[in-house]
Image: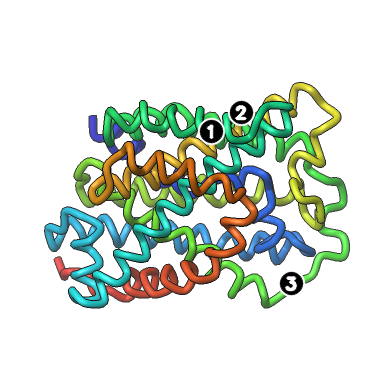
Amino acid sequence: MTEKKTAKTAFIYITALIGAGFATGKELCVYFFSKSVISGICGVLISALLFGISAYKTLLISKEYRIKSYKGLLYFLFGRPLGNGIYFFSELFFIVIFSSMSAAFGELCGILGLMRPAGSLIFCLLCAFILHFGTKGLSFISCILCPVMVTGCYVIGIKYFPKNIFDGANFDIACIPNALIYTSYNILTASAVLFCCQDLGKKQIKTASAIIFIIVLTASISLGCAVVGCKAVLPVYSLIKGSRIFTLIYCIILFCALLTTALSNAVCLKAAVPVPLICALGFCLSLVGFSGIVSKIYFLFGIIGSGLLAGILFCPLKKD
């Protein structure tokens, strides 16, 4: 039973991280593997460590200080006035990311020759159905789709792993700030979604954090090395578009990433906003388009996320 709880916690956290940007390879190219494999590996190592440590500390702080909600964590770390401000922007972030996943699914439907608004509407209705079951729905979906997504990343990474990948590879110091930026704008949802998980003992918290670190690191390296230096809008798709089998695998990974990220953000919103309103807002905002949404919000929320990351990392733990 404890092993299942540990695995569920790790899977829920990971599915909150692997969104459309990761699944397409775009984020990996922009933040880590734009030029050098060595810099990319160093960057994802730093990022995976930060995710693992922040998950560990968030779970342990919540356990030691009996914090039961994301808002409670913000109050504990920053006090009530600043905590309320961060919570407000976090809620705004959650609805924007939910909308961007809906928009991305609509654009995916457009590529397949379907109407984009209809695709976004279907996506929102599917999310509403799953959210009807609350955190159990998220847990169930995460436990099924997380292994599917990660396995797909490994398969594509192995198949398209380039030859002589380390030839001419140099270390770029920019990988360090890039890793911090990438972690910062992902930490808002990742930290909040942990409060949907069941209570774990200290040993299980360590195990779940280790699983998060290992999977984030290996999946990022596997997919990132395959798309290193790629300038295409959809790096992974540019590699596999000539293969029906790998195109199918890619579409499955992308759909899973869109769905789990949308659900993670919607569950974080659910305490403050009714599910029908979440889905209605998500559909309306999705009409702006995925690129239009993402380009306008990531920088702002990255700044807020960096404050949360620092608060979690530097928060003292109780001495045994």
- In the rendered image, residue 202, in percent from the top left (x then y), is placed at 22, 52
Could you tell which of marks 3 and 1 lies nearer the N-terminus?
Answer: 3
Q: Which residue is mark 3?
A: 171
- In the rendered image, residue 137, in percent from the top left (x then y), is placed at 32, 30
| Residue at image coords 57%, 45% | 287
Question: Can you tell which quarter of the image residue 134 is in?
Answer: top left
Question: Can you tell which quarter of the image residue 189 is in?
Answer: bottom left
Query: How far apart are the alpha carbons under marks 3 and 1?
Result: 33 Å
Q: How many marks?
A: 3
- Mark 1 Cα-neighbour bin, 10 Å: few <14, some 14–19, many ≥20: many
Q: Note whether 130 is above or below 51 in the view shown.
A: above
Q: Amino acid at mark 2?
A: Ile
Towards the viewer: 82 or 6? 82
- Mark 2 Cα-neighbour bin, 10 Å: few <14, some 14–19, many ≥20: some
| Residue at image coords 72%, 63% | 38
Q: Which residue is mark 2?
A: 252
| Residue at image coords 57%, 64% | 296
Question: Quick one: quadrant of the C terminus?
Answer: bottom left
Q: Disc 3 on helix, strand or loop?
A: loop
Q: Which residue is mark 1?
A: 256
Q: Disc 2 on helix, strand or loop?
A: helix
Could you tell which of marks 2 and 3 lies nearer the N-terminus?
Answer: 3
- Mark 3 Cα-neighbour bin, 10 Å: few <14, some 14–19, many ≥20: some
CB under 8 Å between discs 1 and 2: yes
Q: Disc 1 on helix, strand or loop?
A: helix
